[in-house]
Amino acid sequence: LYAYASTLKGAEGEKPGQVIVLRDITEEEKEEKARRDFVANVSHEIRTPLTTLKSYIEALEDGAMYDPQLSAHFLRVIHNETDRMVRLVNDLLQLSRFDSGTEGWNFSPQSLAGLLDRAVERFSVQCRNQGIGMFVEVEPRLPQVVVDRDKLDQVLDNLISNALKYTPEKGMIRLAASRDGDMVVVKVIDTGIGIPKKDLPRIFERFYRVDKARSRKLGGTGLGLSIAQQIIEKHGGKIQIESELGRGTTVLFTLPVAKEGVA
Ligand code: ADP
C-alpha cells in the first residue's frame, strides 16, 4: 500500500487541511517484479549454455581437437547445447507472441484419436530406445474437438517428451481421452519419478523446474509446461498436474467438444 500525506496551508482566515492519498500498488509491484525476474531468468538461461560452449571450445583449442575420441565427444556436447539454445529462443519468441497477442490461430474440428495416434508415432523410436511402452485409450464414440492442430500437437509433444524425460526404463505412458459434458478430458499419465508436493503449485511458471541441472541435461528449457498452459487456455480449456513422488505424474487438460453438425 502506498500512502502519501500532505498538509495544506489554509487561505487567510481558513483552517489548514490535510490531503491523504492511498493507492494499492501491490498488484503493480508484483507485475513489475515478475517482469524483472523474467529478464533475469532469460539472461541466466542464455548465459549458462554459453559458458558451457566456451569452455568446450577452449578445451578443443587447448589440444583436445587432436584427440579424435575426445573431440568427437566435445563436439557432440557443443551440438546438443546449441540445439537447446535454439529451442530456448524459439520458445521465448513464441511466449512473446502469446503475450502480445500476435500468435496466429487456426481452429477446426479434429478427431482426438487421430491426434493421439499420430503423437504416438512421432515418439515410437524414442520409446523403443528407452524401453518405455506408450498406449492410447480413447472412449468409444468420442466427439471431435475444436483445436488448432499444430498447437495441440505442440502440447502433446511437450507433455509426452516430459513423460519420456522423467520416466525410467520399463516405464509406461498412457494417453487417455474421455468425454465430460461439453468438454473432452485428455490425460498424459506416466509411471516416472514424480514431482514433490511442494513444487506442484509453481510447476506451470516460466523456468520453474524441480531440478534445473537435470532438466538442462535432458535438453529442457523450463518453458514447456507454460507454453502448453497458454495453448490450452486459448482453446477455452484448463490444464492441471497431479503427481506422486516416485510413482508417476498425470497431466490433465480439457478441450471443448465440437458442436453437432460442425463435426
Ligand atoms: P523442462 O524443459 O524442464 O522439462 P517444463 O516446463 O516442461 O520444463 O517442466 C517443468 C518441470 O516440471 C520440469 O523441469 C520437471 O521438473 C517437472 N516435470 C514436468 N513434467 C514432468 C513429468 N512428467 N514427470 C516428472 N517431472 C515433470
Image (tube, rainbow, N blue to C red):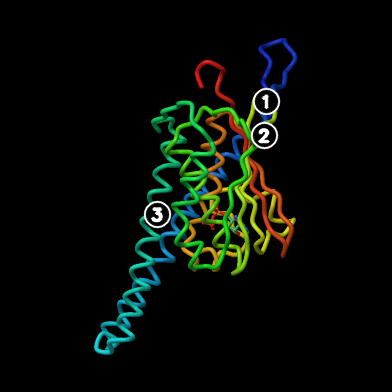
Mark 3 Cβ and ligand 1 under 8 Å apart: no
Residue under the point 72% across and 18% down: 17
Foreground label between 1 and 3:
3
Name the residue carrying label 2: 2
Say which quarter of the image contains residue 191. bottom right
Of the residues shown, which amino acid type is indicated by label 3? Arg
Specify the quadrant that holds the N terminus: top right
- Relative to residue 137, is residue 1 depicted above or below? above
Disc on res. 87 = 3
Labels 1 & 3 near each other (Cβ < 8 A): no
Instruction: Report the side of 13 relative to 67 (left or right).
Output: right
Q: Nearer the viewer, mark 2 or mark 3?
A: 3
Q: Earlier in the sequence, mark 1 or mark 3?
A: 1
SS state under label 1: strand
Residue denoted by label 1: 21
Label 3 element class: helix
Q: Vertically, is 13 above or below 59?
A: above
Q: Residue at x 51, y 48 (%)?
A: 36
Residue at point 50%, 55% (across, down): 41
